[in-house]
Image (cartoon, helix red, strand yellow):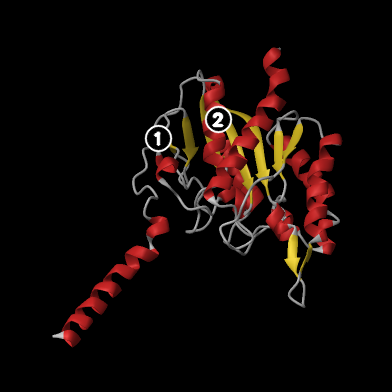
């Protein structure tokens, strides 16, 4: 009997393994509710979400990330509006919790008379050079800048674009790339505003987290990643050079264990920080 029981136990364990391995995906919504946006464009405020994987989100989806809010919609891959639930991005199958949904919820809470439309366009692994007109990114066979611009124009048929949030820089954290980062980001902001015909469009960028500011040396010891530090200096420095621009720090955030991606709690914290910075940028315009 004992060998038979052992065999049955092994079979049971093998049957359970797929369910355990899929636990991170279990809460991802299988059904999405397509809805009609507000009839008045000024009441449908749009935000473009761009950058790489930490904007797209790699945190584990939990119950709170799938609670619907009728005031927060997202533009799905097919160009339809639907009630926003994480993951809102779709760059890769591993997309999870990023800052976007929390950002949308906080922006909606600040003005309950409007509906927030999120336009997710981040692409995991994409360097800043991929975010130029015509550039092709082989990582997911896409044209990040061109695709984002096309999706933004689709969204503009129903609403009004009022801001952009950007989190990127991990792929440019090398000595040669980081030295050019500030100028390239400055050009990107100018290009987006020109192509979207919105010269004063608020733009908020995020800094890299502390867990990316160190790297392991050849002898196994941690050392400062000067290139990542330079990226953060570039992001902060643009506040003195670019109008209608702000940045947020990644202070107090933690990773999912890979020293690269925000966990879900940290991604939500970043979303809250993006919203606070965006609201400050928009405040002068609201007084007029």
Disc ID at residue 198: none
Could you tell whether 176 is left or right of 288 in the image?
Answer: right
| Nearest to the observer: residue 185 or residue 262 | 262
Q: Is residue 159 visible?
A: no
Which residue reaches farthest front? 2
Could you tell whether 115 is left or right of 285 in the image?
Answer: left
Q: Please tell me whether residue 114 is drawn above or below residue 231 in the rendered image.
A: above
**Where is residue 26 shown, x and y percent of the image?**
36, 54
Give the residue drawn at x 73%, y 19%: 284
Could you tell whether 26 is left or right of 90 in the image?
Answer: left
Disc ID at residue 68: 1
Residue annotated with mark 2: 106
Describe the element under mark 2 as helix, strand or loop.
helix
| Nearest to the observer: residue 34 or residue 149 | 34
**Where is residue 109 shown, x and y percent of the image?**
52, 25
Could you tell whether 9 is left or right of 17 in the image?
Answer: left
**Where is residue 138 shown, x and y percent of the image?**
62, 64
Q: Is residue 13 visible?
A: yes
Q: Please tell me whether residue 8 is drawn above or below residue 155 in the rendered image.
A: below
Ranked by sequence position, the earlier of labels 2 and 1 is 1
| Nearest to the observer: residue 49 or residue 251 | 251
């Amino acid at each position: 009997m004992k060998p038979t029981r052992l065999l049955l136990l092994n079979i049971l364990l093998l049957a359970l393994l797929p369910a355990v391995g899929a636990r991170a995906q279990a809460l991802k919504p299988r059904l999405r509710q397509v809805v009609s946006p507000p009839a008045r464009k000024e009441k449908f405020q749009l935000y473009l979400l761009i950058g790489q994987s930490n904007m797209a989100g790699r945190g584990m989806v939990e119950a709170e990330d799938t609670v619907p809010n009728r005031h927060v919609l997202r533009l799905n891959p097919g160009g339809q509006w639907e009630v926003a639930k994480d993951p809102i991005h779709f760059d890769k199958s591993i997309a999870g919790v990023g800052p976007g949904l929390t950002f949308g919820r906080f922006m909606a809470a600040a003005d309950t008379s409007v509906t927030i439309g999120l336009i997710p366009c981040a692409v995991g692994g994409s360097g800043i050079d991929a975010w130029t007109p015509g550039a092709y990114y082989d990582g997911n066979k896409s044209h990040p800048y061109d695709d984002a611009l096309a999706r933004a124009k689709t969204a503009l048929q129903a609403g009004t674009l009022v801001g952009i949030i950007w989190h990127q820089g991990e792929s440019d954290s090398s000595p040669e790339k980081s030295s050019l980062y500030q100028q390239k980001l400055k050009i990107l902001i100018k290009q987006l505003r020109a192509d979207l015909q919105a010269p004063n469009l608020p733009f908020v960028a995020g800094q890299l987290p502390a867990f990316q500011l160190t790297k392991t040396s050849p002898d196994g010891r941690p050392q400062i990643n000067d290139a990542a530090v330079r990226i953060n200096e570039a992001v902060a420095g643009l506040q003195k050079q670019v109008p209608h621009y702000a940045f947020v720090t990644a202070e107090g955030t933690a990773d999912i264990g890979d020293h690269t991606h925000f966990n879900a709690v940290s991604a939500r914290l970043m979303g809250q920080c993006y919203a606070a910075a965006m609201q400050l940028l928009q405040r002068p315009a609201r007084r007029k």
